[in-house]
Image (cartoon, grey):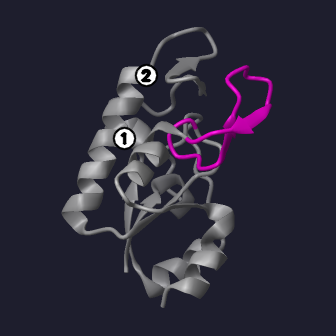
C-alpha cells in the first residue's frame, strides 16, 4: 500500500521548531508499505523553522497574530495532488497539528489546550476519500492492512 506520511514522523526536521518527531511505530510501517513523506506547511511555502501556528475556525494564525491560512491551504492542496499522483490509499499524519491533526488539534489559544477538529490538510484529504490516521493509530492501520 502507498501511504502519505508526515515527514517529521520519519525523522525529517521539518516541524515549526526545526525538529522532527520520530515515531518508533513508523519502522514497521516503512517495512511493509511505500511511504511518501510530506510536510504540508513547507509545501505551502512556509520556512523551517517558522512561527508556531494554530487553527481557529477556518483560519490558521501565528502566536503573534499573523494569518498563515493561505499557506496552509496551499500546502493541503499540494499534498492532495501528491496523494493522487502517487496513488496513496491513506495517510499517517502528525497528531494535533494545525495542518496534519485528525480528530483533535490545538485550540488556537497557544495554551496547550486541545479541541475537537482536524488540521487543514487532514480535512482536505478526508473530504477527498483518503483516510487519515494519527501516529498513535499506526498499529491499528498495520493490523487492518497487510
Query: Please, is residue 117 above or below residue 21 in the view?
Result: above
Q: Is residue 84 left or right of residue 68?
A: left
Residue beneath the point at 80% across and 31% down? 113
Query: Mark 1 near mark 2, Cβ–Cβ under 8 Å?
Result: no
Q: CA distance from mark 1 to mark 2?
A: 11 Å
Q: Position of residue 53 (x, y in %)?
A: 58, 25
Give the crowd class for mark 2: few <14, some 14-19, many >=20 residues within 10 Å.
many
Residue matched to label 1: 76
Residue beneath the point at 53% across and 40% down? 119
Q: Is residue 13 left or right of residue 44?
A: right
Question: Which of these two is toward me, 134 or 43?
Answer: 134
Residue beneath the point at 44% across and 20% down? 68
Q: Is residue 37 left or right of residue 119?
A: left
The dot on residue 24 is none
Who comes first in sequence, dot 1 or dot 2?
2
Q: Position of residue 95 (x, y in %)?
A: 63, 50
Question: Which of these two is toward me, 32 or 115?
Answer: 115
Residue matched to label 2: 69
Residue beneath the point at 32% across and 68% down? 88
Query: Please, is residue 94 above or below residue 110 in the view?
Result: below
Q: Is residue 46 visible?
A: no
Q: Which range of residues does the magenta coloring cover?
A: 98-118
Asked if the stretch drawn in magenta spans residue 100, the answer is yes
Q: Helix, strand or loop at disc 2?
A: helix
Q: Is residue 68 visible?
A: yes
Q: Helix, strand or loop at disc 1?
A: helix
Q: Position of residue 38 (x, y in %)?
A: 39, 53
Give the crowd class for mark 1: few <14, some 14-19, many >=20 residues within 10 Å.
many
Amino acid at each position: 500500500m502507498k501511504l502519505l506520511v508526515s515527514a517529521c514522523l520519519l525523522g525529517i526536521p521539518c516541524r515549526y521548531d526545526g525538529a522532527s518527531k520520530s515515531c518508533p511505530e513508523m519502522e514497521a510501517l516503512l517495512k511493509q508499505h511505500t511511504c511518501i513523506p510530506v510536510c504540508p506547511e513547507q509545501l505551502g511555502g512556509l520556512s523551517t523553522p517558522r512561527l508556531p501556528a494554530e487553527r481557529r475556525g477556518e483560519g490558521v494564525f501565528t502566536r503573534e497574530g499573523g494569518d498563515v491560512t493561505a499557506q496552509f491551504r496551499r500546502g493541503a492542496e499540494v499534498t492532495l495532488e501528491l496523494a493522487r499522483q502517487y496513488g496513496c490509499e491513506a495517510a499517517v499524519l502528525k497528531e494535533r497539528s494545525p495542518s496534519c491533526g485528525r480528530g483533535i488539534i490545538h485550540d488556537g489559544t497557544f495554551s496547550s489546550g486541545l479541541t475537537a477538529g482536524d488540521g487543514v490538510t487532514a480535512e482536505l484529504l478526508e473530504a477527498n476519500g483518503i483516510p487519515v490516521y494519527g501516529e498513535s493509530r499506526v498499529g491499528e492501520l498495520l493490523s487492518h492492512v497487510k
